[in-house]
Amino acid sequence: MPAFGLLLLWLSFKGTNFSEIKQVLSSGNYWVMIPVLGVSFLVYFFRIARWRILFKGLQMEAKPKVLFASLATGYLVNFAIPRLGEITRALILKQQQNFPVNSSLSTVVFERIIDLLCLVCIVAAAFLTELGNDNSMFNSFTAGISLLSPKKVVVMAIVLGLIGLIYFALKRYKTQVGTWVQTIIEKMFELIQMKNKGMFLLYTIFIWIGFYLMTYLWFFMFDSSSKLTAYDAFLVMVLGVVARTLPIQAGSAGAYHYVVSSALVLLGLNIATGNALAIVIHGFQTLFTLVFGFSAYLWLLSQKNE
């Protein structure tokens, strides 16, 4: 969806004076980068720790450094080709620790499902808290909720039904692909019964707190945005995470800028500051992903050559 991302990027900066954005960026307090960097490190740590728990649930001992390399490289691949990074993570673990690809994929899919459920919960929380507020941000949420028309709900139900039929068909007819997919699903059922559910939940909470701080801390970069509240940061974080779920290259470039800058304008910032903040948040995360991704890839190459 690169064309869609470019369209949204154009809409984000349409009618914007770039000299004003440059002036806003030059006035920023870039020391804010230090705590954001620290939180970004911690989010990686919590993701790796949570992932290890899943592998232990499958009676597999994963090395933290391999998980880190797999995670960082997967993010790098997703940056170029969305959703391919998940498969890349499983292939790296196959190469480095000889883990079955379907077992690794089951942990990745399980993670994605948990994070999706968390996203649904925080979107619902944002919607409910905005329900009593008669303002433009509430209108934005209701507009998003209205996208779930009865027709679309029926289509979603049909798609889920088809997935169920495909699963039972694959289970009945023992093809190689069917057996492989069935194994992934069975492994996911094993993960539901894993030990250390409490720690898994705790790491998940820490990850989402990290996501929140990686938005809120940036508010202190500019004088005008520093006046926004912690609750405002929650709303922006929710919308930003939703934008990042779209399968658009370069970390949902365009979609993220459009959604976040629009939200910041609705919260009272001028368009130049809104765009500047969206550029900084997305730009920092892009640089972080590229540096860690390429570093992990080079480490994997060095391991391969040994």
Image (cartoon, rainbow, N blue to C red):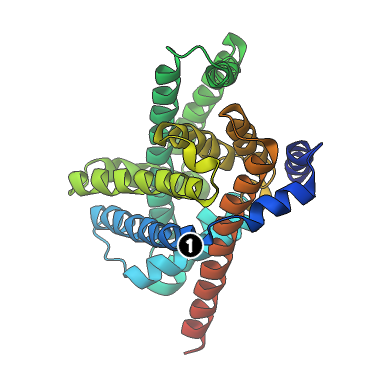
Q: Is residue 21 left or right of residue 188?
A: right
Q: Is residue 7 above or below residue 57?
A: above
Q: Which residue is mark 1?
A: 31
Residue located 41% across and 31% down the image:
231
Q: In front: 138, or 204?
A: 138
Q: In front: 129, or 68?
A: 129
Q: Report helix, strand or loop for mark 1.
A: helix
Locate the N terminus by quadrant: top right
Q: Is residue 18 left or right of residue 122?
A: right
Q: In front: 250, or 25?
A: 25
How many residues crowd around disc 1 within 10 Å: few (fewer than 14), some, or many (20 or more)? Answer: few
Residue located 51% across and 54% down the image:
86
From the top left corner, tell me how far across and down residue 73 is, in percent. Answer: 52, 65
How many badges with numbers are in the image? 1
The quarter of the picture where residue 25 lies is bottom right
Residue located 65% across and 58% down the image:
26
From the top left corner, tell me how far across and down residue 60 is, in percent. Answer: 27, 62
Q: Is residue 22 left or right of residue 154?
A: right
The quarter of the picture where residue 109 lies is top left
Residue located 54% across and 46% down the image:
223
From the top left corner, tell me how far across and down residue 122 is, in percent. Answer: 40, 30
From the top left corner, tell me how far across and down residue 225 is, in percent. Answer: 53, 41
Using the rendered image of the protein, determine whether residue 98 is visible from the camera's viewpoint.
Answer: no
Using the rendered image of the protein, determine whether residue 97 is visible from the camera's viewpoint.
Answer: yes
- Identity, as a three-letter code, of the amino acid under mark 1: Trp
The quarter of the picture where residue 271 lies is top right
Q: In front: 11, or 253?
A: 11
